Image: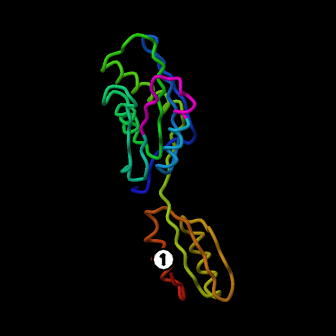
């Protein structure tokens, strides 16, 4: 379905070593650019003594908000390979930071690309990838007399009650998968007295 996306359930870590350089990778589920930037800032502060803290993030169910940064490594050798792994696993709502401690031996452009890619992959595979669904909320009012019809519909459709107020005129908010919203609205509209 179009409302399905994949992300990590919890933060995860990976490590990759190459020619005495250490690449520590940290993958975090995030839901906004601000959250991603806060995670990046935290690792930049925590690993202030590292040579580089490179990163990439992907945000949004449509996977249309993304950015990567080489943080002083040669252009395209760090951020892009990290972002490439996010794309390879078809993930979103994730930020990955890779901290490099230089071991004294230069890795070259291709060596750096491999190292950052593998470190990011290690962090992703260490975590649990989960399937999520973009949700939509539908708020509507209905007369108390329509309560049985509304509750029967809620029970038989894939929706959860988020809020409800029962009075002469009742108000309810339902949460459902984005793809199910038009069908839910249509079925609710068939009940006498329901208004949106």
- On the image, which quarter does residue 159 sit in? bottom right
The image shows residue 149, relative to residue 123, as above or below, that is: below
From the top left corner, tell me how far across and down residue 157 is, in percent.
54, 68
From the top left corner, tell me how far across and down residue 77 is, in percent.
33, 27
Q: Is residue 7 left or right of residue 166?
A: left
Residue at 53 percent across and 23 percent down: it is 49
- On the image, which quarter does residue 109 sit in? top left
The image shows residue 112, relative to residue 137, as above or below, that is: above
**Total numbered circles:** 1
Secondary element at image label 1: helix
Q: Is residue 72 left or right of residue 94?
A: left
- On the image, which quarter does residue 111 sit in? top left
The front one of 4 and 66 is 66
Q: Is residue 168 left or right of residue 21?
A: right
The image shows residue 4, relative to residue 193, as above or below, that is: above
Q: Which residue is mark 1?
A: 187
Q: Residues within 10 Å of mark 1 (few under 14, many from 20)?
A: few
Residue at 37 percent across and 39 percent down: it is 87
């Amino acid at each position: 379905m179009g409302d399905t996306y994949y992300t990590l359930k919890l933060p995860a870590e990976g490590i990759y070593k190459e020619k005495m350089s250490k690449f520590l990778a940290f993958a975090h589920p995030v839901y906004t650019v601000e959250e991603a930037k806060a995670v990046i800032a935290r690792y930049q502060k925590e690993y202030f003594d590292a040579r580089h803290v490179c990163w990439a993030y992907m945000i949004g169910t449509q996977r249309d908000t993304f950015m990567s940064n080489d943080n002083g490594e040669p252009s395209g050798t760090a951020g892009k390979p990290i972002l490439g792994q996010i794309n390879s696993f078809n993930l979103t709502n994730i930020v990955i930071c890779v901290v490099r401690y230089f071991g004294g031996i230069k890795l070259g452009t291709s060596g750096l690309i491999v190292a950052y890619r593998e470190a990011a992959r290690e962090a992703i595979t260490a975590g649990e990838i989960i399937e999520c669904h973009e949700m939509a909320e539908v708020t509507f009012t209905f007369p108390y007399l329509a309560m049985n019809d509304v509750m029967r519909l809620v029970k038989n459709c894939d929706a959860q009650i988020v809020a409800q107020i029962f009075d002469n005129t009742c108000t309810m908010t339902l949460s459902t998968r984005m793809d199910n919203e038009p069908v839910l609205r249509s079925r609710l509209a068939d009940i006498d007295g329901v208004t949106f």
